[in-house]
Amino acid sequence: MIELCDALAAELTAGRTPEDALADAVESLSPALAVPLKATMSAPDLPQALHRLSEHPGAHGLRLLAACWRIGVERGAAFAPVMDGLTQGLRDDHDHHQQIKAQLAGTHATARLLAVLPCLGLAMSWSLGADPLGFLFTTLPGLACLLLALLLDAAGLLWTKHIATRAEHP
């Protein structure tokens, strides 16, 4: 989306008509991205077609492009500055999302470490001469401890994943 909006803003700044600028901007994209957009460009109501296409994952910026198209082309507002603003907004949003992912990397690593920690405890007790597996699998209190530990471990992992997902996609 950023690439498309950037190319469209550059074409508009160069004095191209919005339709020609969009066609050239779409041509500059990779074929996987350009094919659905090329099909959309021939639609009678381009903003509506862009809005429908924005429902695909990663294409939420097309909804904003459709709104800018309505304002710039259909209402006669200056389209190039609007596209520059949209491009900058999409860049800022992308940078913000990347920062959140980077900050959550430590949380994900900690969750994985905490999930493996019980195995390390079992290995340590076995190395000291204890029989943790015999206790856990052959006695009733051991089975209860094992089930409770597995449930708490799974709940911790799910909760951490839930928190990270909510932070990443509010």
Image: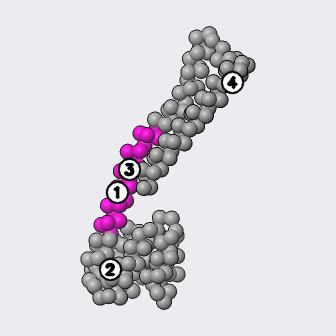
Q: Quadrant of the N terminus?
A: bottom left
Q: CA distance from mark 3 to mark 4?
A: 40 Å
Q: Nearer the viewer, mark 2 or mark 1?
A: 1
> What is the number of the mark on residue 95?
1
Looking at the image, tell me whether mark 3 or mark 4 is earlier in sequence order. Answer: 3
Secondary structure of the magenta portion, mostly? helix
Q: SS at mark 2?
A: helix
> What is the number of the mark on residue 100?
3
19 shown above or below 89: below
Residue 133 appears in the rendering: no
Q: SS at mark 4?
A: helix
Classify residue 125 as left or right of residue 63. right
Classify residue 14 as left or right of residue 114. left
Identify the residue shown where x is 26% and y is 77%. 81
Q: CA distance from mark 4 to mark 1?
A: 48 Å
Q: CA distance from mark 2 to mark 4?
A: 69 Å
Labelled pair 2, 1 in contact (Cβ < 8 Å): no
Looking at the image, tell me whether mark 1 or mark 3 is earlier in sequence order. Answer: 1
Residue matched to label 4: 143
Residue matched to label 2: 11
Looking at the image, tell me whether mark 3 or mark 2 is earlier in sequence order. Answer: 2
Residue nearer the viewer, 142 or 91: 142
Q: Nearer the viewer, mark 3 or mark 4?
A: 4
Range shown magenta: 87-109
